[in-house]
Structures are given as structure tokens and as C-alpha cells.
């Protein structure tokens, strides 16, 4: 299994300039590859292959007077930009043929220097390394200081240097892990220990044993500060340096909210996987719920990110992950006798079963039904999870994201 470990980078001013050149060169090569394939499509000619583009855009381009500055960065960075364009077109054609799962993919677009996220990738051929002093040595950039929040469990196969919208730099390492050895790092649990989780807005998660985890509502709590920074940005003159400073201030405020939400999901998902052998959740239609009047609250909850973390952590540590269908009537069925009482409005939080006269809490009853439905389908050998597991590295793994441990918002919202 492949995972990503992200750590904060602190490049010097000269190194920031070298990274900016690398970002720009990779962007130019990617755009040239997209333009070459669009021109071939307009001329009704076969698409140029990766080798053809590499020879014309990189090998010959570095000796051309209009592209001589491509020689100032590592050739591996340019090759990986071509790989990204080739992968993007492969996903686009697979989506057109119906061979790719998920939402339809559009044709690759041109990258802009104003994009909120800039990234370059170094593979083993680039001969990057971690020095004895703990710095990251990148070709034609130098030794960059890294804030190590944990040791790497294995030798990385590649590293991606990322600059986000708030101006922070990160190094994302791809690590190949062994699930058999990872399973020994968690404490032993009872073979029949399992948990059903009902996700919601009033409470972020309700477990089948009656535990209710409050929703932190990171965005709602930071709205006052976000409004102030956004108002200051709107008053600045476009194109001025003060506007650029105000834009960074807004981006950093949003990044703080996103980091706090991510840290909360990491801590909660790790706790649940650590304490249970099987985890059962419901497949929620987040895209559909995000088109309702509750859109801001749905996005603020971060359900998809939490479920994704549960899924890959269960796969990594040898736990069982089950996901039932979203149309399962978990809120309509009595978890005690199985009587189906029909749909109920959202303002009904408790109800009494007309068959066995059991008083149910709506969320706890749904969590118990989710657990029962998942375990029953698993025992019958049915396909429970509607999504297939990912083969590539997860985009986000716990690491150093610029959140001081003492200021972690997730710790202020204990799940006790």
C-alpha cells in the first residue's frame, strides 16, 4: 500500500526563487504538451506520443533560444510534467469510454501561474536525498530545511514539493507500507469488536453504543474573522502590493480552518480504527446534499474526508471497512424488533416503535441499524462498499501542516 507523508518546508529566499523557476518551467512544459495534442486533434492527426513530446519539448527545447531557461531546472521535473499531461489525457479518454469510475473527466486545461497550488515532483532518477542533518537536498535548488513531525517508516520512492495558496511549502513523500507489519503497531482488539457510525450535522458522528461526537464547525466558528479579512481584501486596489498581502491573509485564514478540520478527522478516524476490528458507515450523497440550503454546513463537516481516512486506515492496519447503501432505511427501522415505521421529518429526534414500544434516539438507532446491515451483508458475502479501493498513494497523510500541537482545534473538541 502506498501512502503520502507531508512535511512543512522552509526554503531560503534564494531557494524560493529556484522553486518558482521550477514551478514555472514545469507549467510551461505541461501547457506545451496540451497545446501540441490540441493542435494535432484540430489537424486530425494522431496524438504525439510521450517520447515525441519529450524529444521536441525538453531535449530540443532546452537548446532553443526561446526556451533556454528550461536548462536551469532538473530535467526530471520537466519529464514528470509530461507524465502528468499524459496521465490527464489517459483519464480523459477512459472517462469518455466509460472505463473510469467516478464523475466524468474533462479535457486537460492549461495551467496558470495564478493557480492556487503549484507542484513539482522528483523521482529517484533526480538523485534527491535526505542529508545527515535532516535537510532535503533537491537538484538545482539546494538543501531545504524540513520540519520533521515523525520519522519516515520506509525509504520514499519520490517527493513532491508543493506551494499552496497561503504561500506555504510542503514536501510530500510517497511511502510503500506493508499492511502485515502495520497491523502489529495497533493494540489487539476483540475479534467481534465493531462499530456503526451515523454521520450528521447536529453531531458529527453518533456511534452505535450511544457515544455522540459534537461537530466542531470550524468554518462557522471562524466566519467572523474570515469576513473581516475578506472585507479588507475587497477594499484594496487591484494589482497593488497591499492587495497581494490581503489575499495571503485570507488564504492563511482559510488554510487554518482546513488544517484544523483535517487534524480533527485524522485523530477521530485513528481512534475508531484503533479500538475496533470492523467499521461500518453509510454511503452519503455529499454532492447532492451540497446543492441544498445546508451546503455550507455539509462542506464544513468534512464527511467525505473522514470516510476516506477510515477506509485507507482500515486497509492499512488490517481492519474491516464496510459501507452500506445510502437508500437503506436506517432511520425508519426499529433496531430492537426490525419493524419499519416509515419516513420521519428531520425535526423528529426521538420516536417510539409501535410494535415493541421501544423509545429510540433517531441517530443512535440509525447507527445500530448501519452496523447490523453492514455485518449482515458481510456475512452473506455481498458487496457492501460501492467504491473500489484506490491503488495509488493517498493524497493526504498525517504530517506537519503548520498546526502547533498545543493549538490543535481537534483537542479543544474532545470526543469524550
Image: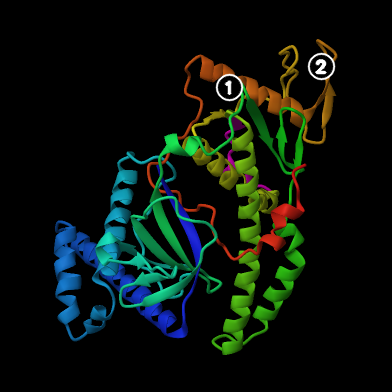
Whole-angstrom CA distance, mark 2 to mark 1, is: 32 Å
- On screen, residue 2 versus residue 250, left or right, reads left
Position of 289 relative to 133 (above/below) = above
| Residue 265, x across and y down, in percent | 63, 48
Task: Write the residue at 16% across / 58% down.
Answer: 49
Please tell me how many numbered marks the rendered image carries.
2
- One can see residue 388 in this view: no
Query: Residues in magenta?
Result: 279-292
Marks 2 and 1: CB-CB under 8 Å?
A: no
133 relative to 373 in the view: left or right: left
Residue 222 % position (x, y)? 73, 63
Q: Position of residue 315 (x, y in %)?
A: 48, 36
Determine if the magenta segment contains residue 95: no
The answer to whether any part of residue 37 appears in the image is yes
Mark 2, residue position: 353
Report helix, strand or loop for mark 2.
loop
Q: Nearer the viewer, residue 211 or 111?
A: 211
Q: Name the residue that disc number 1 marks.
A: 191
Quadrant hosting residue 21: bottom left
Whole-percent x, y for residue 44 in the image: 16, 58
Q: Secondary structure at mark 1?
A: loop
Residue closer to the observer: 149 or 119: 149
Which numbered circle lies on residue 257? none
The local crowd at label 2, few if under 14, some if 14 to 19, many if 20 or more residues have their Cα within 10 Å, is some
Amino acid at each position: 500500500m502506498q501512502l503520502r507523508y507531508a512535511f512543512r518546508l522552509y526554503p531560503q529566499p534564494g531557494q524560493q526563487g529556484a522553486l518558482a523557476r521550477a514551478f514555472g518551467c514545469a507549467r510551461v512544459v505541461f501547457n506545451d504538451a496540451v497545446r501540441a495534442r490540441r493542435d494535432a486533434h484540430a489537424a486530425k492527426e494522431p496524438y504525439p506520443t510521450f517520447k515525441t513530446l519529450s524529444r521536441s519539448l525538453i531535449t530540443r527545447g532546452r537548446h532553443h533560444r526561446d526556451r533556454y531557461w528550461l536548462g536551469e531546472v532538473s530535467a526530471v521535473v520537466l519529464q514528470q510534467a509530461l507524465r502528468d499531461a499524459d496521465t490527464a489525457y489517459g483519464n480523459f479518454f477512459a472517462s469518455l469510454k466509460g472505463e473510469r469510475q467516478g464523475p466524468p473527466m474533462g479535457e486537460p486545461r492549461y495551467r496558470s501561474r495564478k493557480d492556487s497550488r503549484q507542484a513539482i515532483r522528483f523521482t529517484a532518477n533526480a538523485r534527491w536525498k535526505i542529508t545527515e542533518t535532516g535537510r532535503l537536498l533537491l537538484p538545482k535548488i539546494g538543501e531545504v530545511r524540513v520540519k520533521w513531525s515523525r520519522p519516515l517508516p520506509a525509504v520514499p520512492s519520490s517527493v513532491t514539493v508543493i506551494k499552496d495558496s497561503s504561500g506555504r511549502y510542503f514536501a510530500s513523500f510517497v511511502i510503500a507500507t506493508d499492511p502485515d507489519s502495520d497491523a502489529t503497531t495497533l493494540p489487539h482488539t476483540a475479534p467481534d469488536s465493531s462499530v456503526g457510525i451515523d454521520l450528521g450535522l447536529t453531531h458529527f458522528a453518533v456511534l452505535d453504543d450511544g457515544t455522540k461526537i459534537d461537530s466542531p464547525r470550524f468554518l462557522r466558528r471562524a466566519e467572523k474573522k474570515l469576513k473581516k479579512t475578506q472585507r479588507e481584501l475587497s477594499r484594496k486596489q487591484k494589482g497593488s502590493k497591499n492587495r497581494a498581502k490581503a489575499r495571503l491573509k485570507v488564504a492563511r485564514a482559510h488554510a487554518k480552518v482546513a488544517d484544523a478540520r483535517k487534524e480533527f478527522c485524522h485523530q477521530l478516524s485513528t481512534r475508531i480504527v484503533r479500538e475496533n476490528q470492523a467499521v461500518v458507515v453509510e454511503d452519503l450523497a455529499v454532492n447532492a446534499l451540497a446543492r441544498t440550503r445546508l451546503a455550507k454546513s455539509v462542506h464544513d463537516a468534512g464527511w467525505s474526508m473522514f470516510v476516506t481516512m477510515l477506509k485507507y486506515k482500515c486497509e492499512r492496519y488490517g481492519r474491516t471497512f464496510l459501507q452500506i447503501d445510502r437508500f437503506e432505511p436506517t432511520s425508519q427501522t426499529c433496531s430492537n424488533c426490525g419493524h419499519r415505521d416509515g419516513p420521519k421529518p428531520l425535526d423528529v429526534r426521538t420516536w417510539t416503535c409501535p410494535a415493541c414500544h421501544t423509545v429510540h434516539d433517531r441517530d443512535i438507532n440509525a447507527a445500530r441499524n448501519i452496523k447490523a446491515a453492514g455485518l449482515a451483508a458481510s456475512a452473506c458475502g455481498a458487496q457492501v462498499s460501492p467504491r473500489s479501493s484506490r491503488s495509488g498513494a493517498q493524497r493526504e497523510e498525517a504530517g506537519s501542516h503548520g498546526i502547533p500541537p498545543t493549538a490543535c482545534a481537534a483537542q479543544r473538541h474532545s470526543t469524550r
